[in-house]
Amino acid sequence: MSHTAPSPSAAGKLRVMLCDDSATVRSALARVLEADPAIAVVARVGDGAQALATLDAAPPGERAQVVLLDLEMPVMDGMTALPLILRREPRPIVIVASALTQKGASATMDAMRAGASDYIPKPGAAGGGLADPNFRAELLAKVKGWARLRQPAARAPQAAMRPAPTRAGDPPKVVCIGSSTGGPQALAALVRRLPRRIALPMVIVQHMPAGFTAMLAKHLDALGGPPVSEARQGDVLEPGRIYLAPGDHHLLARAEGGRAILHLSDTPPENFCRPAVDPTLRSLIALHGRAVQAVILTGMGHDGLAGCRALAQAGGTVWAQDEASSVVWGMPGAVTRAGLATAQGTPESLGDALARICGARS
């Protein structure tokens, strides 16, 4: 067993356990995490059984608060260990490390259904591997963000809200939801609040690799809300359905023959993302103007800001997730600080509000 005992230097820091069968990966992840002075890696283990033994051996005040869990390991794999780890008290936050494959995407969604808070895709060597700065930023954001959500909520100062449009008789014709870091769980919480039958089409843009979006669509589709599918080239944007932008493609809507047709675009990334929220919003505004409703959920960066600014100028409505419930208040914070949001809320309260404008909950 490779194990790092808690030390006085971990006092007051966020305590993390690394569970991966590769000693090289454990060392690389430890370097990334401990470059942040707020984090201490208190244990490094090679399989799920070692993780459980290490958690049980540590006094509660020294136990890892976050477990970064590989899914494919000998002795006891991550899926077997996950529910057992989550039974420990105090309950650790589990973030699964997943391979960038279809099998890895499917296992990741299974793990999130089983109680994992989030996932981090392991980057391939072509993308710089674990030294990739985007991977490092995402890992730190997820570890620190989920840990912050476990703390007693400090009331954030209320940001200025933009007055809601006062025009009557102009209900929304389409809803666009944008999300990134922490988004899969926020989307699930929102979709669970929607009725099975909705009167509008919805489009979701979640920053996610190719392959993972298909599994996310299946996950959201199984929650009992409206039907959810990964968008395909040529799909008709129809009321009653939710369309998820596929990984590595922007999702655009265009008017053709009196119908709104969805198109997949491989134009360059925007805001370092593909899919990105901004191009989707631009295309929907071109179709429906102020009759677009935008909802910006948790995520790093400011994707969606430009699109929401254009929507507000057109007279449309923007809602944002509040800071207290966001893993990272980057995207929703950007639109809120810019004065574009007419309302803030948790994913659940935003879902309830959408249910009211899309049809009564069943």
Image (cartoon, helix red, strand yellow):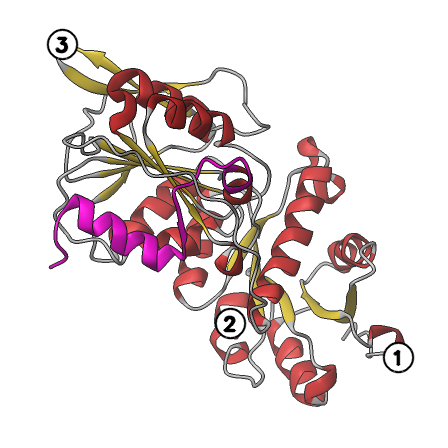
Assign a secondary structure to mark 2: helix
Pointers 1 and 2 in contact (CB under 8 A)?
A: no
The part of the chain drawn in magenta is 335-362
Camera-side residue of 173 and 62:
173
> How crowded is the residue under tag 3: few (<14 C-alpha within 10 Å), some, or many (20+)?
few
Residue topped by disc 3: 257
Residue topped by disc 2: 82
* Spot occupied by residue 258 in the image (x, y as percentages of width and height): 12, 13
Residue at position x 69%, y 45% from top? 137
- Residue 272 belongs to magenta span: no
Amino acid type, callout 3: Gly
Disc marking residue 8: 1
Q: Earlier in the sequence, mark 2 or mark 3?
A: 2
State whether residue 16 appears in this view: yes
Q: Earlier in the sequence, mark 1 or mark 2?
A: 1
Q: CA distance from mark 1 to mark 2?
A: 28 Å
Amino acid type, callout 1: Pro
Nearer the observer: mark 2 or 3; the answer is 3
Quarter of the figure with the N terminus? bottom right
